Amino acid sequence: MGVEESETRHRATPIVSRVEGTHARIRGDLEALQHAADVQVIRAVVEDLPGLLREHFDDEEKPDGLFDELRGLRPVVESQLKFLQQEHREIMQALEDLQRQFQEADQVTTDGELEHRHDHIRVSADAFLNLVRHHERIESGLVAETFYTDDGGSG
């Protein structure tokens, strides 16, 4: 009798697949943001993210969404899910702050002040990037523990 190398604790569902697909798109934007030195590239990424993040967070938080699935399969994750939901709001606030910084920079008339604003935007973009990546690590860990944890061998 052989030992199975990997076993799924619970079968992944369509919502898990959809969330993972959105994660991949978000990771692409984060990768672009990480390597962006030009403020206009940062702006393009920031403009792409609100709809994508709202769609992603909705897939997680809506009734019968990812968080409900995780909660149903592993009730012990409730406090972690509440933390992630709070982080969703923090992420959206950080994104709105970045958008506001771009709007304010558009009003600047001197080169020195504009460069100062752009430096601040770069710092804010880095902080945003770190916040989203931290969030994604926690969330991905919960999904992995629930759906993909090896329960040991059989046989």
Image (cartoon, grey):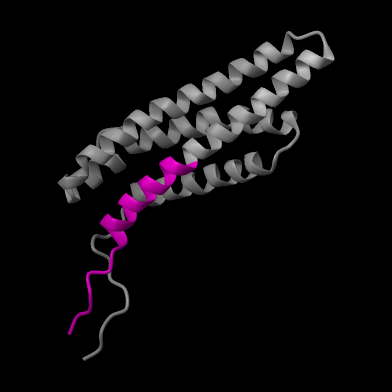
Q: Main SS type for the magenta part?
A: helix
Is 71 drawn above or below residue 41 in the view shown?
Answer: below
Front residue (pair 146, 14): 146
Examine the rendering and report whether any part of residue 36 can be seen. Answer: yes
Q: Is residue 2 left or right of residue 48?
A: left
Q: Is residue 151 left or right of residue 21?
A: left
Residue at 21%, 91% (x, y): give it. Answer: 1
Report if residue 149 lies within the magenta region: yes
Is 74 drawn above or below residue 110 in the view shown?
Answer: below
Is 151 drawn above or below residue 5 in the view shown?
Answer: above
Where residue 80 appears, x then y in whole percent?
27, 40
Q: Quadrant of residue 120?
A: top right
Q: Quadrant of residue 43?
A: top right
Front residue (pair 130, 148): 130
Where residue 24 appears, x then y in whole percent?
51, 49
Residue at 30%, 34% (x, y): give it. Answer: 83
Where residue 122 appears, x then y in whole percent?
66, 30
Q: Is residue 133 left or right of residue 152?
A: right
Q: Quadrant of residue 42?
A: top right
Where residue 61 appears, x then y in whole percent?
31, 34
Residue numbers of the magenta segment: 133-155
